[in-house]
Amino acid sequence: MSLTALAKLTARDIMKTKVLKLDPQSSLQEAVRTLSDMQISGAPVVDRSGKLVGVLSARDIAQPEHLRDPLVGARGSRYEFPDASPDDDGSYDEDTVFSMEGYSPEVLRSGTVGEVMTADPITVAPDASLRAICSLMAREAIHRVIVVEHGKLVGIVTTLDVVRAVADAS
């Protein structure tokens, strides 16, 4: 794929359409276990009617909104994984991202997905350009955008999807 072709990519071209959906009434412990088992760090939250009501991410789990630094912004751009130190290159081991270690046992025992999720997640249309998606992810310091068409969840684009698209263009 050429750089010209890369510039023409849209959310529809790179999104995953098989998306894990979480229920806001599910226990947080169950959701963390599911995310860990699937080796993903977040998922959209939909109510029983199928309406998108939020997104649950590792950031939400590790750092509930009431503990977030108000100077960072509502979505929080400053984030470190619990009980982890970066490697020499500044990255974190993938096991750290998906491990339940370091999460507050009190929150995991009693919390629900709806209590800690980010409500009103950032969404894009399927025809959103790759450039617009990258700009949005960088500006909001997020690792996933939910793709919605006519009010319905149709996919998800993660930073890994973006990296794959760029790598394929090389």
Image (spheres, rainbow, N blue to C red):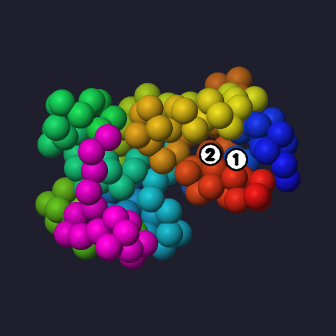
User: Residue 15: which numbered mark, if any?
Assistant: 1
- Identify the image quadrant of residue 124: top right
Tell me what residue is drawn at x 64 percent, y 25 percent. Answer: 151
Q: Tell me: 3 left or right of 100.
A: right
Looking at the rendered structure, the kind of residue marked 1 is Met
- Quick check: marks 2 and 1 in contact, CB under 8 Å? yes
User: Where, quadrant-wise, is the C terminus in this rendering?
Assistant: bottom right
Q: Secondary structure at mark 2?
A: strand
Name the residue nearer the viewer: 32 or 128: 128
Name the residue nearer the viewer: 100 or 93: 93
Q: Is residue 56 above or below residue 11?
A: below
Q: Tell me: 19 left or right of 26.
A: right
Tell me what residue is drawn at x 62 percent, y 45 percent. Answer: 156
Q: How far is disc 2 from disc 1 in space, using C-alphas?
A: 5 Å
Residue 70 visible here: yes
Name the residue nearer the viewer: 43 or 80: 80
Q: Secondary structure at mark 1?
A: loop
Residue 34: horizontal and vertical position, in percent?
A: 46, 66
Residue 52: horizontal and vertical position, in percent?
A: 53, 34
The residue singled out by tag 2 in the image is 156
Q: Main secondary structure of the magenta part?
A: loop
- Identify the image quadrant of residue 108: bottom left
Task: Farthest residue to the top: give it.
Answer: 150
Magenta stretch: give its range.
77-95
Q: Tell me: 167 left or right of 21.
A: right
Residue 160: horizontal and vertical position, in percent?
A: 59, 57
Chain-order first, disc 2 or disc 1: 1
